[in-house]
Image (spheres, helix red, strand yellow):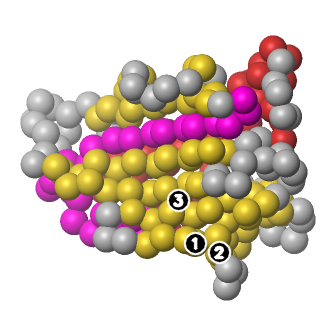
């Protein structure tokens, strides 16, 4: 049974790039096999992701849903790390606009978004998490080598680990057992690799 589609190795594709002057794009995706993909929707992904954030950070970062959207807070009552506003819901995606927080550069991009999307394929459902036009405080307005390195080894690394672990957990929970996953690079995302 080790070679059947249900138990095969899963790929998680990743790309993290610096675009424009100080805007970041981070994309992670995977394909959930058709036999396990029932009920996979963008709304379900977002709900699972919020639970994962709290669990993965051991409650240090707590997503709090508000009337306007979602706040990622430090220890639930601490500062808003990031604030999101729900701006788009469709059958194939849900988009949260980044609207503030201490991790966002105060003169940051106006269009930063986090999108959860699902694309039906013959083999299953492609799940994509896409963070785009995010302007982190750590990079500043015109990041030099030190700021890029600081961001790369702190916030970018944490975001990548959290998101990849989320997709691994998704495969494991849907399969009902541990699933072997391997990382592959997405090559067609333009920008300077982080």
In the picture shown, does residue 8 fall above or below 66?
above
- Is 32 on the left or on the right of 61, as rendered? left
Q: Residue 86 carries which label?
A: 1
In the picture shown, does residue 85 fall above or below 161?
below
In the picture shown, does residue 72 fall above or below 138?
below
Q: Determine the secondary structure under disc 3.
A: helix
Pinpoint residue 170: horizontal percent, then vertical percent.
Answer: 39, 52
Q: Determine the secondary structure under disc 2.
A: strand
Q: Do the residues labelled 2 and 1 touch (CB within 8 Å)?
A: yes
Which residue sits at x=45%, y=66%? 94
> Which residue is the site of mark 2?
69
Which residue sits at x=20%, y=39%? 7
Q: In which quarter of the image is residue 76?
A: bottom right
Q: Badge 3, how many Cα within 10 Å: few under 14, some, many 20+?
A: many
Q: Is residue 40 magenta?
A: yes
In the orientation shown, which residue stands out farthest toward the bottom? Answer: 67
Which residue sits at x=35%, y=50%? 127
How many numbered marks are there?
A: 3
Q: Is residue 29 magenta?
A: yes
């Amino acid at each position: 049974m080790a070679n059947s589609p249900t138990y095969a190795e899963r790929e998680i594709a990743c790309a993290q790039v610096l675009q424009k002057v100080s805007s970041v794009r981070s994309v992670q995706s995977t394909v959930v096999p058709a036999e396990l993909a029932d009920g996979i929707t963008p709304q379900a992904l977002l709900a699972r992701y919020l639970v994962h954030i709290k669990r993965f950070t051991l409650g240090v970062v707590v997503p709090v849903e508000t009337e306007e959207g979602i706040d990622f807070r430090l220890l639930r009552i601490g500062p808003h790390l990031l604030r999101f506003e729900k701006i788009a819901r469709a059958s194939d995606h849900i988009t949260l606009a980044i609207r503030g927080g201490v991790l966002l550069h105060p003169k940051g991009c106006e269009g930063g978004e986090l999108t959860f999307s699902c694309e039906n394929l013959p083999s299953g459902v492609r799940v994509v998490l896409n963070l785009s036009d995010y302007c982190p405080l750590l990079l500043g307005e015109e990041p030099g080598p030190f700021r890029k390195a600081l961001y790369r080894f702190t916030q970018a690394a944490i975001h990548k680990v959290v998101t990849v672990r989320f997709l691994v957990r998704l495969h494991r929970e849907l399969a009902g057992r541990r699933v072997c996953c391997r990382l592959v690079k997405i090559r067609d995302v333009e920008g300077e690799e982080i």
